[in-house]
Amino acid sequence: MILRNAVGSLVFLLGGVSAAVAQPKLIDAHMHYNGDPAFLKLLMAKLDQVDGLAFLLTDPKDLDGVKDFVKHHPNRLVGFGEVQLDAPDVLHQIDRFHAEGFRGLGEISGPKHNYDDPAYSAIYERAEKYGMMILFHTGIVNRTSPEIPADVSVDRMRATTLDNIARRYPKITIIGAHLGNPDYSWAAEIARWNPNIYWDVSGSTLIKKQEDFTFFKSVFWWSGIASPHSPKGGPSAFEKLVFGSDVFGGELEEFDRELERYHKMLDVCGVSSEAQANIFGGTLWHILNK
């Protein structure tokens, strides 16, 4: 069970014993579990090193093998259920993840319909009922086995499809992976008016844009602007970003590489230390403590 104390720390009940969890320095919203218990040990060492917490994206087949580990490391791991929207038992899977204390769903990917199709309404209703966050893949997606036919379309995973979901389910916190790559402007504009949408900028974007990081100032343009055309908010539009490493396949080295890319981009764009503190953890910590 998860409780909250008066100072905003999470309090977990493990075997009847309460354990307060202090705010970490870093929260990774996008960490894939590869099903290998050995990876968990390496991940724990990395998170201890940086005083970090990771949203561990877990396939339903791996739930039984990882649920106790997640429960016993509440200061380092938050469970996310990596369900498929079109799975015939998807609602049952969501129920199982929720029953085990998982706080979110994702990374959602590969839908047979657009993300905002009414066919998925029952799924989003269930997530909203349970107070679960949702991490969606957006934009271009890899094709690791091009010789095998696959019913996958990036058009169904456009950043714009999250706008309708955010408006229909205002209690769901939505994280869009990859800032809609390459639809960055659309992604930012959607986040500008939807207080329940955030983005990570993991993947290839900070590699291909490394010679032009100031580009992102044109995407997150409304910092400090007082206008009826912009919502009231904090001093930095960049705070619609959260950190995500998109580590998958056990390649934990990508965590350090992505962390370095984030820091370089934000520094080049002149993002304040206060805003960066929220991007690297404060925003998600607040959401976890709602």
Image (cartoon, rainbow, N blue to C red):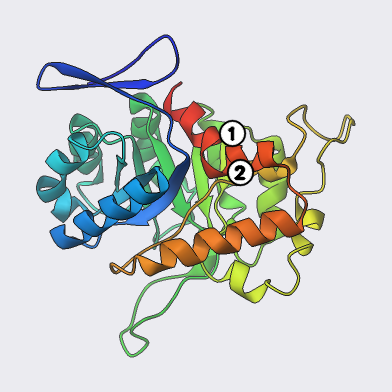
Q: Which dot marks residue 48? A: none
Q: Residue at x 10, y 46 (%)?
A: 64
Q: Name the residue carrying label 1.
A: 167
Residue sitting nearer the eye, 207 or 80: 207
| Residue 202, horizontal then vertical, whole percent | 52, 61
| Residue 226, horizontal then vertical, whole percent | 89, 30
* Disc 1 element: helix
Residue 119, above or below 231: below
Residue 78, above or below 178: above
* Disc 2 element: helix
Q: Is residue 122 left or right of residue 223?
A: left
Residue sitting nearer the eye, 227 or 54: 54
- Residue at the extreme top: 6
Please give the count of numbered marks on the rendered protein: 2
* Identity, as a three-letter code, of the amino acid under mark 2: Asp
Residue 193 appears in view: yes
Q: Name the residue carrying label 2.
A: 163
- Number of other residues with Cα within 10 Å of mark 2, as a class: few under 14, some 14 to 19, many 20 or more: many
* Cβ atoms under marks 2 and 1 closer than 8 Å: yes
* Identity, as a three-letter code, of the amino acid under mark 1: Arg
